[in-house]
Image: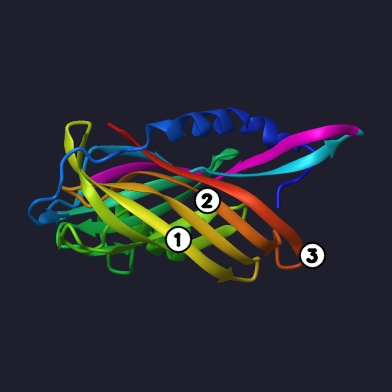
């Protein structure tokens, strides 16, 4: 899936590779057990300014320009999303998200969603007012963002509960997967109560661009008050075949995956 010869874009994201790799050792971990059910998503939004979700895709090769040895080839794909929000009636927030590719931050896509404390999360729609009345550059992507940004229903989290959480990986095409997550316990981030979950995936995935076994394992941290997913660290493997576009030839793929989500606060 990754190329042997470096491309200009690889140089632009070289710093991201080092940063993402260094963050693996700082995955969130639970420090208090769940003794009673925890109510999640009682407020529509919090002081969240920006999220980035890079996916590092890498594999080894065994020779390069005539020299014998093991060399790692890696690329980083993903997006960074800036948020602005304004109240919309009682217990609701209109959220404008500016989404830019990691290697193309100068060309953002504008998405607008409505999020309520009762659990509803949807894209801008006809009849909306305020910021939402301007609509989104990509309504279908806005709808996906509404579900990916966090939980979509107020709920009680029990210690033995299993949550299904969607994740969109960039590898380099978009790959939508569904994690199975079990609560580990409570944590605190920026003075806010959070829940930390252990998550796994081991699934055969077939799409127009991928025919492979995808394995992931790691943790997700969710803000208790809003249900927003604050951070993720997932590592795993993709084994099978892939193609970057509909008209490209299929290529064998045996890649390591490192996915990270990190939220910056206002």
The reply to whether the C-beta atoms of the residues labelled 2 and 1 are less than 8 Å apart is yes
Q: Is residue 85 magenta?
A: yes
| Mark whose residue sits in front, 1 or 3 | 1
Secondary structure type for disc 2: strand
Residue at 52% x, 58% y: name it.
215
Question: For the residues marked 2 and 1, what is the alpha-carbon distance in whole angstroms?
Answer: 9 Å
Secondary structure type for disc 3: loop
Q: Quadrant of the C terminus?
A: top left
Q: Position of residue 178 (x, y in %)?
A: 42, 64
- Asked whether 55 or 90 is in front, the reply is 55
Q: Position of residue 132 (x, y in %)?
A: 31, 57
Q: Which residue is mark 3?
A: 249
Q: In this rendering, is residue 6 above or below 214?
A: above
How busy is the neighbourhood of tag 1: few (under 14 within 10 Å), some, or many (20 plus)? some
Q: Main secondary structure of the magenta part?
A: strand
Q: Which residue is mark 1?
A: 201
Q: Which residue is mark 2?
A: 236
- Furthest toward the right, the residue is 66
How busy is the neighbourhood of tag 3: few (under 14 within 10 Å), some, or many (20 plus)? few
* Image quarter of residue 83: top left
- Furthest toward the left, the residue is 36
- N-terminal of the pair, mark 2 or mark 1, is 1
- Asked whether 184 or 232 is in front, the reply is 184
Question: For the residues marked 1 and 3, what is the alpha-carbon distance in whole angstroms?
Answer: 27 Å
| Residue numbers of the magenta segment | 67-86
């Amino acid at each position: 899936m990754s190329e042997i010869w470096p491309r200009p874009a690889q140089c632009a994201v070289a710093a991201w590779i080092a940063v993402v790799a260094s963050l693996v050792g700082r995955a969130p971990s639970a420090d208090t057990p769940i003794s009673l059910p925890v109510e999640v998503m009682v407020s529509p939004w919090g002081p969240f300014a920006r999220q980035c979700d890079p996916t590092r895709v890498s594999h080894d090769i065994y020779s390069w320009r005539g020299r014998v040895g093991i060399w790692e080839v890696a690329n980083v794909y993903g997006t960074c999303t800036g948020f602005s929000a304004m109240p919309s009636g009682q217990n609701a927030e209109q959220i404008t998200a500016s989404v830019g590719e990691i290697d193309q931050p100068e060309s953002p896509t504008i998405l607008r969603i409505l999020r309520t404390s009762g659990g509803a999360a949807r894209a801008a729609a006809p009849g909306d007012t305020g910021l939402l009345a301007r609509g989104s550059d990509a309504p279908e992507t806005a709808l996906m963002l509404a579900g990916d940004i966090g939980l979509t229903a107020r709920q009680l989290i029990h210690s033995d509960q299993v949550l299904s959480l969607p994740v969109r990986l960039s590898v380099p095409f978009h790959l939508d997967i569904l994690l199975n997550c079990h609560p580990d316990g409570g944590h605190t981030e920026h003075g806010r109560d959070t829940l930390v979950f252990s998550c796994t995936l081991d699934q055969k995935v077939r799409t127009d661009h991928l025919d492979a076994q995808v394995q992931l394992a790691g943790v997700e941290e969710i803000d208790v008050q809003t249900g927003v997913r604050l951070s993720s660290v997932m590592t795993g493997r993709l084994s099978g075949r892939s193609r970057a576009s509909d008209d490209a030839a299929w290529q064998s793929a045996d890649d390591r995956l490192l996915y990270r989500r990190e939220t910056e606060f206002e």
